Amino acid sequence: MALLQISEPGLSTAPHEHRLAVGIDLGTTNSLVATVRNGISVVLNDENGRALLPSVVRYLADGSTWVGEAAQAVQSEDPANTIISVKRFMGRGLPDIGGSSEMPYRFVDAPGMVQLRTVAGIKSPVEVSAEILKVLRVRAEDALGGSLVGAVITVPAYFDDAQRQATKDAARLAGLNVLRLLNEPTAAAIAYGLDNAAEGVYAVYDLGGGTFDISILKLSRGVFEVLAANGNSALGGDDFDHRIYCWLLEKNGLSALGASDTRLLLMRARAAKEELTEHAETRVTAILRSGEAIDTVLTRQDFHDMSQNLVAHTLQPMRRALRDAGLAVTDIKGVVMVGGATRMPQVQRAVAEFFGQAPLTNLDPDKVVALGAAIQANVLAGNRGGADWLLLDVIPLSLGIETMGGLTEKIIPRNSTIPTARAQDFTTFKDGQTAMSIHVVQGERELVADCRSLARFELRGIPPMVAGSARIRITFQVDADGLLNVTARELGSGVEAAITVKPSYGLSDTEITRMLQDSSQHAQDDMQLRALREHQVEAKQLLEAVQNALEQDGADLLDQAAQARIRGSMDELRTVLQTDDHLAIKRAITQLNDVTVAFAQARMDKSVSRALGGRKLTDMEV
Amino acid sequence: MPAIAPDFQQDFFQLFDLPQNFRLDNALLERYYHALQEHVHPDKFSHLSEAERRVSMQWAMRVNEAYQTLSNPVRRARYLLSLHGVDIQEESNTAMPADFLMEQMEWREAIEEARQARDTAELDTLESRLQQEIRSLESQLATSIDDSRDYAAAAGDVRKLKFLEKLAEEIASAFDAIDT
């Protein structure tokens, strides 16, 4: 189905070929992959013509892995090894997971991200998610007939740093180059093409399988600016299923069901929920392991009553987001509904009532996020014909550090537009102190204990001095993916302190390397090959970028010597590209980047000086 | 890679090519902000060299910082005063006029009462009144900074504004608490 035309079909993207890039919606319940083909964003189907890939992964004793429909259909047979809704475990510890004791999984209790003991060994949620992403990558490469330059992967806007990093790690494991982590509501806004017809402030209500997001966006002259984001990363359609499940137990006088029966009834509950969107009542039937038969009728009204407070739980974040944006409900021009769970009539009613207007639902709520992600992927990959729009997104939760007495000090406030950086100065309190430890947290509360622990940073290499005389500037930087990076410098000496990061709920680099090796039988060879391919792609991209830059601004901004240096470095890279020496290629890439830094700065200065000039001219014409 | 620190010698007003005044056309500021980001934002450089991506990041962060500072009246005033070498001394100077402090206490009590009584209508009323006070202080600031260039007086007004900002936060917390 053609959805959004963003350039005339037939317009080539010469002089270079169209770069293959996709958008991936890694959902709690279903995942999808989409791409821009002939100027139109389309979802890619599997060989059976199905767009949705159930986010279900089954591990078998023989070492094989089933992903999607096949795993979902038989999930009640082996619930302990058939992982559903793994998104709820990403970047989370066991204490974070509500209802974990009811789940059939064999959790591994240890500090850090939760892990699952399966017949195929201990699996991290990152590995499970990577299996889903791998299927989508292969689907895309088959459909498009080539390797992907990269993918935009969507995440709930309310995901914190640990959850985002876990998603990025999963993509890396699946062999994907992440162009951007994109917030799901923002992706939906792009897909709705709201930049054209519709200037104004919009709300995106995104209720997925396991997460809820509300984003307030302002659209003006091709700029999508997120004003506020709020939500609940542990509230979604799954919880509605669970209500029906509990009701079924009660109605039928059941208790303490085994894992298989539990999973079976949850499947029935979901089906019932979906039935009630179209019908006023539905019949739930099932045969339990004991042979006992369930045959119960559920009405839409009863479902509405039992799940009412879940819907109510989505209203508070909406009020908060509006307050943060400094807006009233009447300022909202339109409401976009995203996520399968928004099909529920009681959700649509509640949202319509809250905003005093009927929500927009013309795009398929299951597909809209992937479609939007594909549109952005097309732009980020560097294909021409991408629409001329700009995305300004925000960090949803404040970042802070632990200070004396277990309190938090906010460094970067929530809803700050990204990328952003904030510096804070610290000093030593012992003579000769050469190291320091910083605990970074995320959240809005005063006490560290009530916030999310992100990581502990150890700074080393501080020049030894008298206590209190060192001035260590720690810079907290949040990039366009919403990920935190920390640098530190002692201001007096200019020494950059070395930083080791111990993520609280994430994977270390060594763990990821191990997983990469584990995932392949010919581990060492594959790693080399993968590295070689990555560097080759990067090198080609770099050479093309520098060539274009020289053609546009070389004569203007560089003297002969500088141009010669750059061309020399380019030649070296071209030479080394003929070999298979990925380390040498990487070195040549680094060298070319180093040699073009000053040029890049000069080009930016020139571009910026033109930015306002053009704008002022337009203003004067008005 | 050599340390990238673009020579950000311009102050925020110069960056936006706006006069160094407290009075500001918000719509114009926003248009210039968008125009700048369209040129520097990382999304425009994603497929280019790492050197260009790094420069873009530095610039985008700078532009965001500049916009966040200039678009908020309190931050803008503080920044303007710092450009004139006047430090607000918020941390050290807690000696506010007694009548002002009395008012602050009254405000706090009113907010607390409304919170206890779960009276959102009252909180709405308090919020409107607070916004009026904030507006009037801001217009006072415009006069002292732009017209009379009395930076000492302006510094006092900014300190007051910070107190009012805290009150606004307390009202927001009260709404939150009632909502839970």
Image (cartoon, rainbow, N blue to C red):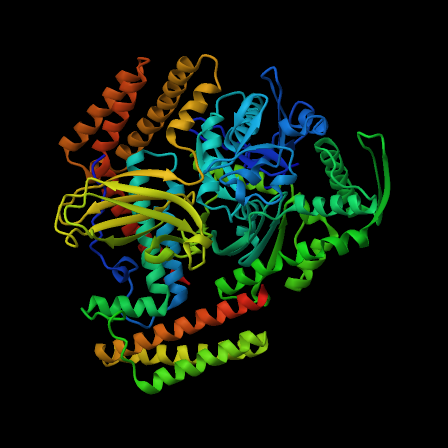
Q: Is residue A59 above or below residue A203?
A: above
Say which quadrant the N terminus of chain A sits in: top right
Query: In terms of depth relative to the viewer, which is nearer, A568 or A414?
Result: A414
Q: How many marks?
A: 0
- In percent of the image, x 49 and y 26: which residue is there? A174
Query: In terms of depth relative to the viewer, which is nearer, A189 or A439?
Result: A439
Residue A588: x and y, percent? 25, 23
Image quadrant of residue A574? top left
- In percent of the image, x 31 and y 47: which residue is there? A438
Q: Is residue B71 above or below residue A137?
A: below
Res B169 seen here: yes
A270 lies left or right of A160? right
Query: In terms of depth relative to the viewer, which is nearer, A587 or A507?
Result: A507
Residue lying farthest to the bottom in this orientation: B99
Res A362 seen here: no
Residue B42: x and y, percent? 37, 43
Residue A253: x and y, percent? 82, 44
- In percent of the image, x 28 and y 36: which residue is there? B51
Residue lying farthest to the front in this orientation: A256
Image quadrant of residue A584? top left
A248 lies left or right of A55? right
Q: Is residue A242 above or below residue A78?
A: below
Say which quadrant the C terminus of chain A sits in: bottom left
Residue A522: x and y, percent? 45, 12
